Amino acid sequence: MRIQHKYSYNMNGVYLVTEEKQNTGHSLSIQEAEILLKAKSLGFLVVIIFVEAATSAYHTTAQHRVKMNEMKEFILRNPNANSVIFFDESRVTRLIEDFYTGFIVPVKEKIPTLTLYSTKLEGEWDENDPIVQMRLTLAYEESARKSSTAYSYHNGVINKSPNDGKPKRPGSRYPYGYTKLSKEDIELIPDENASIVQFIFYLYSYGYSEKKIATLLENSNVPSPSEYNHWNDSSIRYILTNHWYKGDLTWFARTSYSNSKKKSIEEISLFSNHHQGLIGSSLWEITQFFRNSKNKDRMNSPFLLRNLVFCKDCGETLKTKNQTSAKSKNDSSFYFCSNCKCKVRKDTLHQKTINDFAMRWARGLKSQIQTFKKVSSNWKQMCAKTIQSLKDDIDVLRYKLGTLKETDEFYEELLQAVESQLKFQEKQKLYYQSVLLRIEELSKDQMLLEIIARFLLDIYRYSTEEKRSIFLLSIKQIEFDFKRDHFNIEYRLSPYVEIETLMDDSLEMKTS
């Protein structure tokens, strides 16, 4: 349930602290009435109110609550503000110590005469009073119990297999693009906004930024997800990072309650092929590559080959520079090597690359599909061998762990070293298992035909973002020889850049 905390200041320096349950407002009116009565009995009149929306006193410390800090600063700026009234202890903290360390201590350092009152206790509120400490402890234990119960419920639901063998999605807001036929239905099905989700993934896979996609949807009056008032970068990002659209159920994906950053794929609860997805594995793989790429914020750059061109002599990545004056009709942009002090005109390199690219992909769709089948087969074998090797290493480390004795010399150091290696190897095994699953899914996905077909069309018809996205998916690197005015393009074996890079790195490690 969403909660609002309410703080009020009166002419004699008293603050009102209560909460409002947004669905009814009854809790607010009752608590506010009691606080006003308390203020009246103390001879105070409330004149100013602060409202803090949807903030948990259990998950958010007093130091990090916006209105709590505003109240603290207001008291420190006003010498007459020397008293605080709140409904009860649970309104100001559910973590026992944070209200004392984050609010009371810094305020009393400047205003030693600060007094606090609770509507539930007679006289001044004293943090050292055993009854107060008991009430603080009870509030904390209540919140901890509710948090644990909620976690256990979600954990139990997603790990419980119904008759069809699939885990159930815990109750929460429907993902944008899905709905239920009725409240009694368990399964979510695509709704009228499903095509919007697919459109977003397609646009992003062609190099368009989250901001540009959001602007397009907003200007077209497309309905946004319910938790957003309009389309923006965040709403697009929410969709692009949601595994649900790929057909997977994920849970416990946040780093923490207060940190919405996603955990790594190996650390979350993930159930593949849980339901009908809206996009295939290929489209997901490509959009995630662009999301993780250092180039994602420069897809509209006129330097289509940025970070792809290297100097043959020194191996450095060529930098870019635009020296075109505002009045000039000629483009004076170029790529240059800062070490060798050499440069090549942007348009010249682009033209050579486009000509070579057109010849490369003129071989046709069928031959490229056959190439990928061979490559993916090799990748599967590499992953399987790596996983087996890691399993063998894990068995050896577990054996070593079992033979260690507390009487052994350097026991603690050895124990820490073996446990650290074991943790690393187990994490690596999970990672390669997830990569193998990705490769198997990509091998079955017919979307590969559409991805490769992009390379066969006339590249001049594409926008700047689209050209750059295609080059990033198809070109591994371009080596430019300034001495001979010659270049060589190394093309990728597939459009799945992250997996191909991982496989190349693994092969290089084994051969080095």
Image (spheres, grey):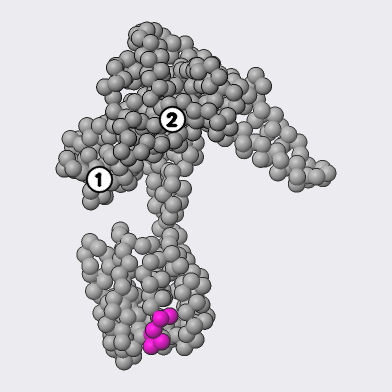
Q: Position of residue 361 (x, y in %)?
A: 37, 12
Please state, as top left, top right, bottom left or bottom right, where the N terminus lies in the image.
bottom left
Residue under the image location 34 percent in, 30 percent down? 330
Q: What element carries label 1?
A: loop
Rate crowding at label 2 as few (under 14), some (14 to 19) or many (20 or more) other CA atoms within 10 Å. Answer: many
Rate crowding at label 1 as few (under 14), some (14 to 19) or many (20 or more) other CA atoms within 10 Å. Answer: many
Q: Is the magenta stretch mostly helix, strand or loop?
A: loop
Q: Where is residue 452 in the image (x, y as percent from the top left)?
A: 35, 17
Q: What residue type is labelled 1?
A: Trp
Residue under the image location 21 percent in, 40 percent down? 217
Location of residue 448 with respect to 318 vertically, above or below? above
Residue under the image location 42 percent in, 22 percent down? 349
Question: Any magenta on residue 120?
Answer: no
Q: On the picture, is 180 further left or further right than 104?
A: left
Location of residue 29 with respect to 367 vertically, above or below? below
Q: What residue type is labelled 2?
A: Phe
Give the distance between the C-alpha atoms of the residues marked 2 and 1, in whole angstroms.
Answer: 37 Å
Residue, disc 1: 231
Location of residue 289 with respect to 155 vertically, above or below? above
Q: Residue 334 carries which label?
A: 2
Q: Mark 2 or 1, which is nearer the eye? A: 2
List the single residue furthest toward the front. Answer: 327
List the single residue furthest toward the left. Answer: 221
Residue under the image location 17 percent in, 40 percent down? 220
Please state, as top left, top right, bottom left or bottom right, where the C terminus lies in the image.
top right
Instruction: Report the magenta residues as a range.
Output: 76-81
Which sits earlier in the primary sequence, circle 2 or circle 1? 1
Residue 406 found in image quarter = top right
Question: Viewer-proximal residue, 462 or 223?
Answer: 462
Q: On the picture, is 416 further left or further right than 13?
A: right
